[in-house]
Image (tube, rainbow, N blue to C red):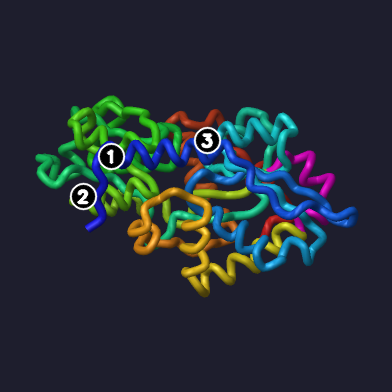
Amino acid sequence: MFQLSSWRLAAIVLLIVLSALTMFAASPASAQEKTIRLLRAPVGAFQPLYIAIERGYFRERGLAVEIAIGGGPDQNIAQAMAGQVEIVMTGSVPLVAAVANGVPVVAVLGAEAHEEPATTGLMVKADSPIQTLADLKGKRIGLPGIASPQGLAILLALDGVGLTQKDVALVNLPFDAVVESAERGQVDATFPIGFFYTLAKGQGFREFPSVVRPLEGTPAVLYAATRRWAEENPDTLKAFNEAMLRAYADANTDQALVRQVDRQQTRLPANFIDTRPIVPFEGAFKRNAWHEMNVGLARFGFLPRVPASAEYIWAGAPQ
């Protein structure tokens, strides 16, 4: 069983945050290479970047990719819009919300979708009196972002049992606080992601697996760029995608490559790295599933409108 004490968890989070201050650059670019500055996600779905560097896939295509560890999805988009970097890792909801509000940014490559094995879910403590979704009435639900895929999943689940957002208290929490808040009784249910989802499962939390089903096929993590940069640099972006898709194929064939990058680029516990579920890397977007998610987000007021896919997906993205 995978367990961590609260102080140990806090120490790991601190190490992750401190590591975000470090720039991991590729080897210096030659005069013939095009440099791409990229912000990756702090934890998860970034591993093929390092596989592509290690195996020379970027270099073969005339690219030098300089990687820095980014912050939250919204922060990364802001960095791209400010011209600090060319490509960022972000989430589907922050990207579409930006586009719906007039920000010219586009998804250029998928990274990870909401697929099996699950890496997120609605959970309660093992001894919780909450046995059904209807029991959530009047309860506090902690999640890392209310305007998020998890927020949408919660509201759809409530709707299915005749409840609305007014019947619960949605509590916006940092990624690292969703499990601990449930342990301390500060929230009655929790919706952790990634490492924290695995942590909760290891500590005996019970899950409501049906809640995440509406998210299946939608993007969880993706690469994005400003529309202007994508349209002015289509050959560079195509070369980047070709290298990444090759690295995706390697990673999907041999998960040991992914775990090796985890050991080199994170401070996560070794037993977590060795056993964590790895969702296949996927470059193409399931556009219909993404559109349906956006319709749901607009229905619950998370988006001011539902953009057309051409507004938020680069024309040259993998099909």
What's the residue type where badge 2 is placed?
Answer: Gln
Q: Residue at x 46, y 41 (%)?
A: 16
| Distance between the alpha carbons at the discs numbered 1 and 3 | 19 Å
Q: Earlier in the sequence, mark 1 or mark 2?
A: 1
Mark 3 residue type: Gly
The image shows residue 127 at horizontal and vertical percentages of 10, 44
Q: In the displayed structure, does residue 282 sit left or right of residue 150?
A: right
Q: Please identify the dominant SS of the magenta region.
A: helix
The residue range painted magenta reads 225-238
Which quadrant would residue 164 be assigned to in this image? top left
| Residue corresponding to mark 3 | 72
Of callouts 3 and 2, the N-terminal one: 3
| Quadrant containing the N terminus in the rendered view | bottom left
Comparing 75 with 296, the one in front is 75
- Mark 2 crowd level (few <14, some 14–19, many ≥20, 10 Å Cα): some
Give the secondary structure at mark 2: loop
> Is the residue under label 2 in contact with that under label 1 (CB below 8 Å)?
yes
The correct choice, above or below, for 306 with respect to 199 in the image is above
Quadrant for the C terminus in the image: bottom right
Mark 1 residue crowding within 10 angstroms, few (<14) / some (14–19) / many (20+): many
Q: Earlier in the sequence, mark 1 or mark 3?
A: 3
Give the alpha-carbon distance from disc 3 to disc 2, as whole Å: 26 Å
Residue drawn 70% across the image and 32% down it: 81
x%, y% of residue 207? Answer: 23, 50
Which residue in the protein does label 2 denote?
203
- Name which residue lies at 39% across and 37% down: 175
- Determine the residue positioned at 51% across, 44% down: 42
User: Tag 1's secondary structure?
Assistant: helix
Report if residue 233 lies within the magenta region.
yes
Asked whether residue 129 is drawn in magenta, I would say no
**Compared to 82, does 314 lie above or below?**
below
Q: What residue is pinned by disc 1?
A: 179
